[in-house]
Image (cartoon, helix red, strand yellow):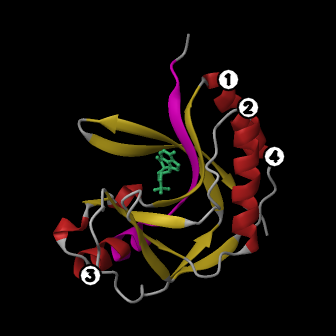
Amino acid sequence: MSAERRLFFALSLPAKLQKHVIQWRADNFPAETGRPVAAANLHITLAFLGEISAIKEAALTRVAGRIQGQKFSLQLDDIGHWPGSGVVWIGTKRAPNALLQLASVLRSHAARNGCHQSTLPFHPHVSLYRSATRPVAIPPATPGWPLEATEFSLYESLFERGRTRYRCLQSWPLGE
Ligand code: 2AM
């Protein structure tokens, strides 16, 4: 019997953008804001799958390979704090249709394969801090970094030596 893995579909951030975001975060938030997300872990979740079996993983990997998603670009120009989940995030004020469609198709396939999906509307974001449950002074704006999405990926979430690490299992290109 094979073990279940904790998986999710996401968009990654290029290494250069990760560095900019981390520097900006350090310059704009006090250290006690929350638990900072490591640079390599910055991403936009498209669909969270939870702990799933190898059979479900294979089914969803097949589905992902058949998706004919389109490339898109967005601006990381929004910022907020969700005290309930303790997340400080950056996001976009204008989510492109291609992003919304990609997330929607992945989330509906996930649901059809028995992966519980949140009933909250999809709100694309990059989590910057977790466990941020106390009030946070939110900077008025982000630098508005552009993000070009040319592929999406399946990640495994691992907890090793007290740290969360995301391992990219497979990526699929987005077309013109
Ligand atoms: P996030 O997108 O707000 O950062 C891997 O755990 C990723 O899936 C995280 O980025 C996490 O939150 C997202 N995610 C979405 N729903 C989740 C859930 N129910 N449990 C854990 N992570 C979830």
Q: Secondary structure at mark 1?
A: helix
Q: Which residues are magenta?
A: 3-20
Disc 1 + disc 4, Cβ < 8 Å: no
Q: Which mark is residue 28?
A: 3
Q: Secondary structure at mark 2?
A: helix
Which residue of the protein is positioned furthest toward the left in this rendering?
A: 31
Could you tell me how far apart the alpha carbons at marks 3 and 2 are, in whole angstroms?
Answer: 42 Å
Could you tell me how far apart the alpha carbons at marks 4 and 3 are, in whole angstroms?
Answer: 41 Å
User: Which residue: 71% across, 49% down?
Assistant: 106
Counting labels gives 4
Q: Which residue is mark 2?
A: 59
Q: Residue 131 falls in which quadrant of the image?
A: bottom left
Q: Is residue 162 left or right of residue 158?
A: left
Disc 1 + disc 2, Cβ < 8 Å: yes
> Which amino acid type is marked by label 3?
Asn
Q: Nearer the viewer, residue 113 or 118?
A: 118
Please state, as top left, top right, bottom left or bottom right, where the C terminus lies in the image: bottom right
Spot occupied by residue 3 in the image (x, y as percentages of width and height): 51, 19
Check the image and report above or below for 3 versus 34: above
Spot occupied by residue 79 in the image (x, y as percentages of width and height): 44, 78
Q: Nearer the viewer, residue 151 or 94?
A: 94
Check the image and report above or below for 4 versus 43: above
